[in-house]
Amino acid sequence: MSKAKEKWYQRGSAPYEHVTPALTIAKYVLLVLIFIVSVGPFLWQLSTAFKGASEDIYKFPPDLMPSAPTLANFAEVARRIPIWDYGMHSLIVAVASVITNAIFATMAGYALACMNFRFKKVIMGLFLSTLLLPGEVTLTSQFLTVRGLGLDNTLAGVWLPGAIGAMNVLLMAVSCRMIPRDILDAAVIDGASTYQRLRYVVWPNVRGMVSVVALFSFIGAWDDFLWPLVVLNDPEKYTLTVGMQYLQSNFGQNPRVVAAGTVIALVPIIIIFATMQRYFFKGVEEGAVKG
């Protein structure tokens, strides 16, 4: 047996040439099914947004290509709700969440991974325990806190609970832990302060993971519906996801307009992911310090 084959068997995997045609067919069938389940609803929603009133949107199998594409549904959305104002409110909250998570999650992750202090394990356990709780459990306490600070019915109140996420801190802690200890010790010996170690040693090696945290923070803040609905009671301050509910109530019999509003809300996320996917996958694969 050749050395290459021995390696494959040692890893517990069959060599590539042993993959049967049936296995290959099953793999592609599974990929097609996953594609249909994950992308199919979005394509149907996108098609519905461009269909006119005369087209049947409930036809099966659905026609994904509108026979007479129209932008009237999008114009109706813009006419019925102040979509630009709502979109700007969502953008403000999302950008603020990205900035605070990128900065403070990096600092907290560095502290948990590279610094020694009392009750470090207890704090790490608290962070992990928060991941086990659904957001609805802490909804009341968060609202009382925000109201006590006088931030209810404000965009600052919408942003505050998501200013730093426990998952983001843990992601940054894992990334910081990958930095060789010798490099950090050498920086300490050279007299580097904590800020200098963060700026010149830690940051260059965790930028990929920061992009992952930034992307998750943006999507989470942009898509959030329940918390802004609880905090805000003035329609003029609504975020985009909350404001879209006016389409559902006013146009319950016209799903084409609702679909158009959904597509509008998805456009910024698609643009952000398309422009940052290179950094996102780099951050996911990042696991060591480059020499």
Image: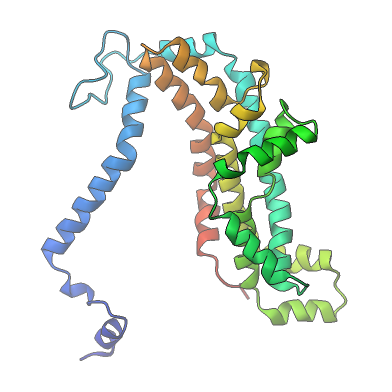
Residue 158, horizontal then vertical, whole percent? 67, 34
**Residue 97 position within the rendered picture, expressed as x and y whole percent measured from the top left:** 67, 42
4 vs 22: above or below:
below
| Residue at figure coordinates x 53%, y 53% from the top left | 280
Q: Residue at x 80, y 35 (%)?
A: 149
Q: Is 273 located above or below residue 166 in the figure?
A: above
49 vs 104, left or right, is: left
Q: Is residue 202 left or right of residue 252?
A: right
* Quadrant for the C terminus in the image: bottom right
- In-front residue for pair 113/194: 113
Give the percent coordinates (x, y) of residue 209.
59, 59
- Say which of 111 and 95 sits in front: 111
Q: How is the image coloured?
A: rainbow
Relative to 77, 119 lies left or right: right
Residues 245 and 148: in front is 148
Is the residue 286 above or below the residue 185 in the image?
above
Can residue 96 be seen? no
Query: Can residue 29 be seen from the camera position used here?
Result: yes
